Amino acid sequence: MNAIVAARRVVGLCALALLVASVMQLATARASNPILFGASPGQRGIETKQQALQRIQDQTGRPLDIVRVYKRWDAPFPDDFDTLLETTGQTELR
């Protein structure tokens, strides 16, 4: 009976060691290769760029890491929206 209990403990410890090693490997992979989530928030009706961004972030339940911004060649830069993205730490893709 004691041999069975000891064998179960060994198997349990091995399973725990494998689980910890897997979690550590996953954490290392995420840290070295992050996945960034982004979009180009299109304005609806009289929505501002800021309101369109907020709408998408509310729908997804998280802030966007990257925001695609389309500008005309003669548009002023930076504008209020560019400044907002910079202050919130979001990457602007032009």
Image (spheres, rainbow, N blue to C red):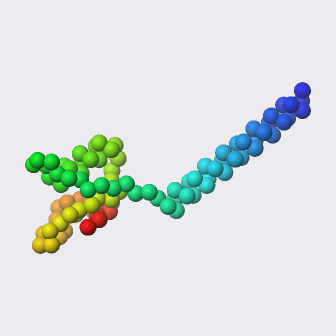
Residue 37, given in percent of the width and then of the height, sits at 37, 54
Question: Looking at the image, is 11 positioned above or below residue 73?
Answer: above
Q: Examine the rendering and report whether any part of residue 76 can be seen.
A: no
Quadrant location of residue 12?
A: top right
Q: Which residue reaches farthest bottom?
A: 74
Q: How many marks?
A: 0
> Quarter holding the N terminus?
top right
Residue 4, given in percent of the width and then of the height, sits at 86, 31
Nearest the viewer among 44 and 52 is: 44
Left or right: 71 with respect to 8? left
Q: Examine the rendering and report whether any part of residue 57 can be seen.
A: yes
Residue ID at (14%, 68%): 72
Nearest the viewer among 76 and 70 is: 70
Q: Which residue reaches farthest top?
A: 1
Question: Looking at the image, is 59 positioned above or below residue 30?
Answer: above
Residue ID at (23%, 53%): 41
Quadrant location of residue 55?
A: top left
Quadrant location of residue 58?
A: top left
Residue ID at (17%, 66%): 71
> Quarter holding the C terminus?
bottom left
Residue 11, given in percent of the width and then of the height, sits at 78, 39
